[in-house]
């Protein structure tokens, strides 16, 4: 019995796993920030517990004594306050307007405290890479410098700023008020880490997407063998949608001078990625067909199946559509072998 490669949305959904497979979650976890934060949160809590909110520098003394990396401490605060690199970049850009005398005046325990900034504003943008709070840098410890001290103080006590505009901007930056209070800290931080904030959520979604692409590439290469050339973010010669640059596919497979372009989308929560791929599907299908090559889609995830119209379009303009399971990948392997030798 011949295999039906071009499934409709109903046939595809019957084979789908809908939620991230354990092997992909495990692969992504190796490079994710989230496990690092969870693993170090108890030490993070102990530092805040030992610090005295009435003495601004006390937190830095405890951090130094504990030899806790400044960039990791900052990342904890960024997640807990949901105040990541984007809002920090905006603050840095207009820093002199927000802090014309380079001081933050804030209230704590009935007292007014002044903190004088020494390193802010920083040159350029306060990106995760610059702060060493990105996935690649977070495991490399950074010393506590005036640069880190300035940002940490903003995220610890920003909500207590006397200036109402600043207090509103930093409304979630309340962690400093709990310093020295272990019960409040544990309750707040443990609850906060039940949820993955938008800061790490975006990184994790990207990480899972990259892991999904990597796993599919390695699986296909193992099954097809070395005579098949598989490239991540590959191209098909002569296939271009603007007559200038070659179209990029999540994976390209070459054999006998024939190609299969593969697009991958796994979305647990619905977003616009599948809509973008659907918008490109008809044009890609037509130009690939004309060139004598093939296009396949690996589509899965509960969120994608909520986008019925987009998924229907992709299924219509695909030579082969499979879900994200090993058995489905085996069908894709058979399709590739059958079509390009």
Image (cartoon, grey):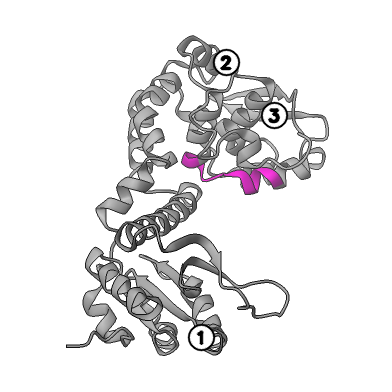
The residue range painted magenta reads 79-89
Numbered label attached to residue 324 = none
Q: Is residue 214 visible?
A: yes
Q: Is residue 332 above or below residue 39?
A: below
- Determine which quarter of the picture holds residue 320: bottom left
Q: Residues within 10 Å of mark 3 (few under 14, many from 20)?
A: some
Q: Which of the two discs, 1 and 2, labels the residue nearer the N terminus?
A: 2
Asked if the magenta segment contains residue 249, the reply would be no
Q: Is residue 239 left or right of residue 163?
A: left
137 and 236: which is toward the camera: 236
Q: Quick one: quadrant of the N terminus? A: bottom left
Sequence-first tag of 1 and 3: 3
Residue mark closest to the camera, 1 vs 2:
1
- Taking 151 as reference, is 228 above or below it? below
- The residue sitting at 36% across, 35% down in the picture is 38
From this viewpoint, is residue 174 visible?
Answer: no
Identify the image quadrant of the C terminus.
Answer: bottom left
Q: Main secondary structure of the magenta part?
A: helix
Query: Percent from the top left, x then y, of residue 86?
Result: 63, 49
Q: Circle 3 — which element?
A: strand
Q: Position of residue 282 (x, y in %)?
A: 52, 88
What numbered label is drawn on residue 292?
1
Q: Which residue is mark 3?
A: 105
Estimate how packed mark 2 is, as few (under 14), some (14 to 19) or many (20 or more) residues with alpha carbons within 10 Å.
Answer: few
Query: Which sits earlier in the primary sequence, circle 2 or circle 3?
Result: 2
Choose between 31 and 270: the one closer to the eye: 31
Query: Residue 48 sits in which quadrant?
Result: top left
Report, in whole angstroms, how far the alpha carbon at label 1 lies from the one at label 3.
68 Å
| Residue linked to disc 2 | 55
Q: Nearer the viewer, residue 210 or 228?
A: 228
């Amino acid at each position: 019995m011949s295999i039906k490669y071009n499934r409709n949305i109903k046939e595809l959904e019957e084979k789908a796993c809908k939620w991230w497979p354990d092997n992909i979650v495990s692969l992504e976890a190796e490079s994710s920030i989230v496990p690092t934060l969870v693993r170090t949160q108890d030490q993070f809590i102990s530092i805040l517990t030992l610090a005295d909110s009435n003495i601004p520098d006390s937190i830095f003394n405890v951090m130094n004594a504990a030899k806790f990396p400044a960039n990791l401490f900052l990342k904890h605060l960024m997640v807990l306050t949901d105040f990541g690199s984007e809002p920090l970049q905006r603050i840095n850009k207009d820093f002199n307007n927000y802090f014309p005398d380079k001081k933050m005046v804030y209230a704590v325990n009935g007292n007014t405290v002044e903190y004088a900034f020494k390193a802010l504003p920083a040159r350029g943008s306060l990106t995760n890479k610059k702060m060493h709070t990105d996935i690649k840098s977070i495991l490399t410890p950074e010393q506590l410098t005036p640069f880190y001290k300035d940002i940490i103080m903003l995220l610890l006590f920003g909500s207590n700023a006397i200036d109402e505009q600043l207090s509103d901007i930093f409304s979630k930056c309340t962690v400093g008020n709990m310093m020295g209070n272990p019960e409040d800290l544990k309750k707040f931080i443990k609850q906060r880490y039940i949820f993955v904030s938008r800061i790490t959520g975006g990184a994790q979604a990207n990480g899972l997407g990259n892991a999904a692409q990597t796993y599919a590439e390695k699986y296909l290469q193992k099954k097809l063998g070395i005579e098949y050339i598989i490239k991540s973010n590959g191209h098909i010669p002569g296939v271009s949608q603007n007559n200038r640059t070659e179209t990029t596919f999540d994976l390209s497979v070459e054999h006998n001078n024939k190609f299969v372009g593969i697009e991958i989308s796994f979305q647990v929560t619905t977003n616009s990625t599948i809509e973008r791929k659907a918008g490109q599907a008809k044009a890609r299908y037509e130009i690939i067909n004309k060139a004598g090559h093939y296009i396949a889609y690996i589509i899965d995830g509960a969120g994608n199946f909520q986008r019925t119209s987009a998924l229907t379009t992709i299924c219509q303009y695909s030579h082969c559509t499979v879900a994200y399971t090993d058995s489905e990948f085996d069908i894709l392997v058979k399709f590739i072998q059958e079509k390009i030798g």
